[in-house]
């Protein structure tokens, strides 16, 4: 198709640009928003518990068999494992960038199932959990009692039952990690009494396994001549501490019955006492909310805030839900600054274009090109699976000066024809496009060839620069299409030659400004030519300057600090304190409670 077709059919040219705009708007509405692209490699978290075992036992009997089975799973990079003295063990499996996390989860589950026969019976009974681990934390929520009317166990249990399931159902929420323990029936054995009756902990474990069970009891009267058939029921699992305490341990020779409450203290407590949470010096529960890859962080946080308001209205008296940390404030501020910079760049480009073209009509054409190119790029971001983040927006800011070049070249070429004496905008546009169409295509392809290779980079830096480079390349590609279709059509419709002062016609403001600018600009060009001639006559000075600049460049590259992305202050301070092993677990908490403000999370 010849370019003359787009000049002869301006409506067709406009439809092409409108179609690009429509696709861009649709993509913009559906694009997920986040601070940075998801650069973390897919990770799978395998966890289990071996009650009563120390770290060494967990490592040898649980972690080692699981590691041997998981090792070598498809697309695995490496894995790390931890074991603690409270019987818990975990393995984190890291996969190569780009691996499907759902398939990775399935593959790891298959490997774990192969190793279950090698695990202790207690571990198999509890089960091994395999889940995708999300690292992109959005919020930290807290539920606490300002008047200390509820203890930490109650608050943790209330949070897990009434709040956590509702948070998990929000679209885009990947994980809700409540940092606390569930309710559990605690049986504290008395060693002295146990020894007196010749009992060991295994006897109590067998007792719980025999008497505290749920089982199918069947029916009475089935397959007989009885008129009635009854379904048998029994008490099943115990629920209260009193019921557990009345369980019969053994019968004594004296005819008395030894019950569990005689050899142990039974109470409803926490499953683990290794974690203590206090908010503003009061007992409470905290949770970390993470998002899934490719989801819209802003929309998720809005839904969480909406749910938090609903939950706060139904909380029991004495409980308060608060927001300890949210990435929305920082994300909104970052996106706002980038959008502000984008708007400022567009305005400056339009002003500079008007300054050099000296015509409002001519300025409209590059301005339209900027809008079509930038908005159309959002359609590509959506199709490519990218997100609206700081990198893609920054790429759009930088590419503004480039996408406007193609349209400016078209306008300048048409204006040059006017300066040569053309009076017909249609004829000037056709002759101008015959000379610059190849140049527009060539320069655009060269620019795109510089940034497209970034899509072949691997690793974390590749994830960053792929979105940055391809965004710029696609924006320039769209600007080239616009410069070959809409821009010449608008030139033929809008542009007019400047009025010649010698014709005697009244000069417009644009014409007077054009003549004044040309005189001043020609003087500046003359000075530039004199400067160039000065360096041409002294070529040795140019060579010395080039060598000095090369040396300075090498020096700065070696001395300048390097990093993937700059550190940014999010207004949050996390403090981690490690005490010696001999320090009691409640001692640091007692020391911190003396502070007017507890050592937790400080917000600016």
Image: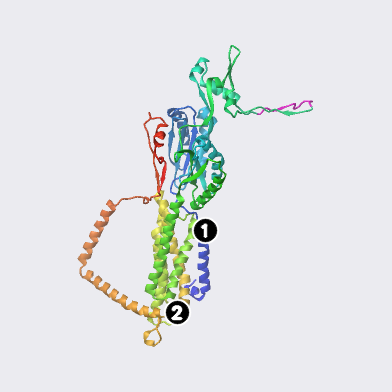
Query: Which residue appears at 46% of the width and 73% of the height?
Result: 488
Marks 2 & 1, CB-CB < 8 Å contact:
no
Q: Nearer the viewer, residue 426 or 501?
A: 501
Q: Quadrant of residue 220?
A: top right
165 with respect to 223 (left or right): left
Relative to the observer, which residue lies in front, 532 or 507? 507
Rendered position, 252 above or below 413? above
Determine which of the numbered discs, if any, sits on residue 29 in the image: 1
For marks 2 and 1, give the one nearer the viewer.
1
| Nearest to N terminus: mark 2 or mark 1 | 1
Q: Is residue 103 above or below residue 208?
A: below
Q: Which residue is mark 2?
A: 425
SS assignment at label 1: helix
As drawn, the residue found furthest toward the front would be 147
Secondary structure of the magenta portion, mostly?
loop
Q: Position of residue 73 (x, y in %)?
A: 47, 39
| Residue range of the region highlighted in magenta in the rendering | 216-226
Whether residue 110 is visible:
no
Residue at image coords 59%, 22%? 247
CA gap between label 2 and label 1 equals 39 Å
> Residue 345, labelled with which disc?
none
Extreme residue in the top direction:
254
At mark 2, the secondary structure is helix
Where residue 389 sits: x, y (%)? 44, 55
225 drawn magenta = yes
Residue 436 % position (x, y): 40, 72
Q: 101 or 501, which is in the foreground?
A: 501
Please tell me whether residue 56 belongs to the stretch shown in magenta: no
Dot 2, crowdedness within 10 Å: few (<14), some or many (≥20)?
many
């Amino acid at each position: 198709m010849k370019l003359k077709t787009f000049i002869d059919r301006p409506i067709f040219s406009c439809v092409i640009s409108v179609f690009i705009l429509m696709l861009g708007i649709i993509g913009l509405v559906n694009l997920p928003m986040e601070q940075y692209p998801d650069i973390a490699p897919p990770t799978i978290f395998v966890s289990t518990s071996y009650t009563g075992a120390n770290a060494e036992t967990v490592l040898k009997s649980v972690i080692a068999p699981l590691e041997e089975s998981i090792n070598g799973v498809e697309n695995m990079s490496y894995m790390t494992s931890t074991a603690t003295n409270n019987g818990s063990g975990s393995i984190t499996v890291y996969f190569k960038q780009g691996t499907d996390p759902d398939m990775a989860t399935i593959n790891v589950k298959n490997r774990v199932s192969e190793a279950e026969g090698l695990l202790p019976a207690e571990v198999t009974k509890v089960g091994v959990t395999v889940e995708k681990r999300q690292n992109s934390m959005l919020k930290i929520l807290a539920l606490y009692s300002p008047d200390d009317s509820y203890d930490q166990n109650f608050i943790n249990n209330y949070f897990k039952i009434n709040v956590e399931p509702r948070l998990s159902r929000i679209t885009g929420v990947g994980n809700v990690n409540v940092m606390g323990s569930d309710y559990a029936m605690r049986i504290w054995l008395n060693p002295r009494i146990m020894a007196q009756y010749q009992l060991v902990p295994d006897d109590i474990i067998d007792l719980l396994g025999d008497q505290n069970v749920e089982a199918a009891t069947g029916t009475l009267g089935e397959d007989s001549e009885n008129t009635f058939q009854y379904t048998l029921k029994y008490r099943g699992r115990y629920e209260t501490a009193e019921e557990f305490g009345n369980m019969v341990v053994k019968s004594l020779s004296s005819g008395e019955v030894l019950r569990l409450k005689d050899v142990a203290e039974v109470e409803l407590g926490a499953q683990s006492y290794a974690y203590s949470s206090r908010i503003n010096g009061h007992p409470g529960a905290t949770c970390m909310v993470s998002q899934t890859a490719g989801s819209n962080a802003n929309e998720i946080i809005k839904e969480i805030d909406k749910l938090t308001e609903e939950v706060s209205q139904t909380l029991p008296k004495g409980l308060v839900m608060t927001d300890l940390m949210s990435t929305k404030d920082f994300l909104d501020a970052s996106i706002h600054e980038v959008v502000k910079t984008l708007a400022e760049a567009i305005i400056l480009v339009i002003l500079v274009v008007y300054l050099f073209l000296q015509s409002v009509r001519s300025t409209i054409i590059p301005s339209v090109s900027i809008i079509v190119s930038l908005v159309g790029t959002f359609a590509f971001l959506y199709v490519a699976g990218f997100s609206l983040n700081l990198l893609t927006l920054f790429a759009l800011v930088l590419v503004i000066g480039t996408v406007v070049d193609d349209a400016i070249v078209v306008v300048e070429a048409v204006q040059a024809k006017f300066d040569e004496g053309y009076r017909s905008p249609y004829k000037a546009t056709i002759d101008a496009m015959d000379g610059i169409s190849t140049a527009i295509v060539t320069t655009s392809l060269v620019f795109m060839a510089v940034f497209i290779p970034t899509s072949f980079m691997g690793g974390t830096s590749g994830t960053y620069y792929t979105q940055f480079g391809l965004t710029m390349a696609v924006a320039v590609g769209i600007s080239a299409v616009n410069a070959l279709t809409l821009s010449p059509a608008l030139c033929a419709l809008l542009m007019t030659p400047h009025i010649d002062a010698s014709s005697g016609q009244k000069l417009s403001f644009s014409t007077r400004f054009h003549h004044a600018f040309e005189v001043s600009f020609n003087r500046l060009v003359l000075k530039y030519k004199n400067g160039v001639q000065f360096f041409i006559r002294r070529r040795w000075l140019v060579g010395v300057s080039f060598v000095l600049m090369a040396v300075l460049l090498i020096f700065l590259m070696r001395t300048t600090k390097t990093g993937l992305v700059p550190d940014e202050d999010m207004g949050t301070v996390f403090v981690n304190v490690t005490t010696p092993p001999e320090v009691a677990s409640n001692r640091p908490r007692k020391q911190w409670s003396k502070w007017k403000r507890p050592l937790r999370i400080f917000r600016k």
